[in-house]
Amino acid sequence: MYILLNAVDHLADYGVMHRDIKPNNFLYDPETRTGLLIDFGLSEITINSETNKPIKHAENEQVKKIAQLQKHVKIKNRVGTKGYMPPESLFNYRNQTPSVDVWACK
């Protein structure tokens, strides 16, 4: 669990929400005690709703490109695995943070 939470913390440091954390998306090797978070198909960069800019690394060119792409895609119905989704995702709240990933780790 420590390794999974460490991965979630690392993503949050970069302003990334994985949005689909579940046992099937975390590979763990007990022999080496290493873990790998996979399947970033639903991930998003955390955007400030007032400025419409990424919260972290806003001047990074790659982050700017991803944020622009997110705007054009206009994600309306964020989906994931229902048993691991926090209330703000289930009710499609507009402003979500990396805390959605912490909820899934429960």
Image (spheres, helix red, strand yellow):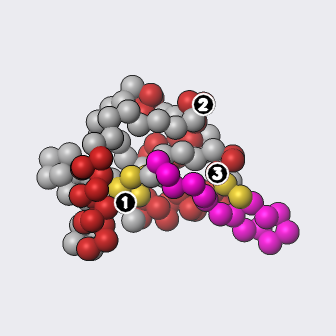
Where is mark 2, residue-wise?
83
* Labels 2 and 3: the sequence-earlier one: 3
Residue pointed to by mark 3: 25
Q: Find residue 74 and report its horizontal and vertical position in percent.
A: 28, 42
Residue at image point 33% right, 41% down = 75
- State how far apart marks 2 and 3 are (Cα): 14 Å
Where disc 3 sits, the SS reads helix
Majority secondary structure of the magenta segment?
loop
Membership of 90 in magenta stretch: no
| Residue 78, position as x, y percentages in the image | 41, 37
Residue with the mark numbered 1: 15
Task: Identify the element where label 2 is drawn.
Answer: helix
User: Which type of secondary structure does the marked residue at label 1 adopt?
Assistant: loop
Give the Cα distance between marks 3 and 1: 19 Å
Q: Earlier in the sequence, mark 3 or mark 1?
A: 1
x and y percentages locating residue 106 in the rendered image: 61, 40
Q: Which residues are magenta?
A: 28-42
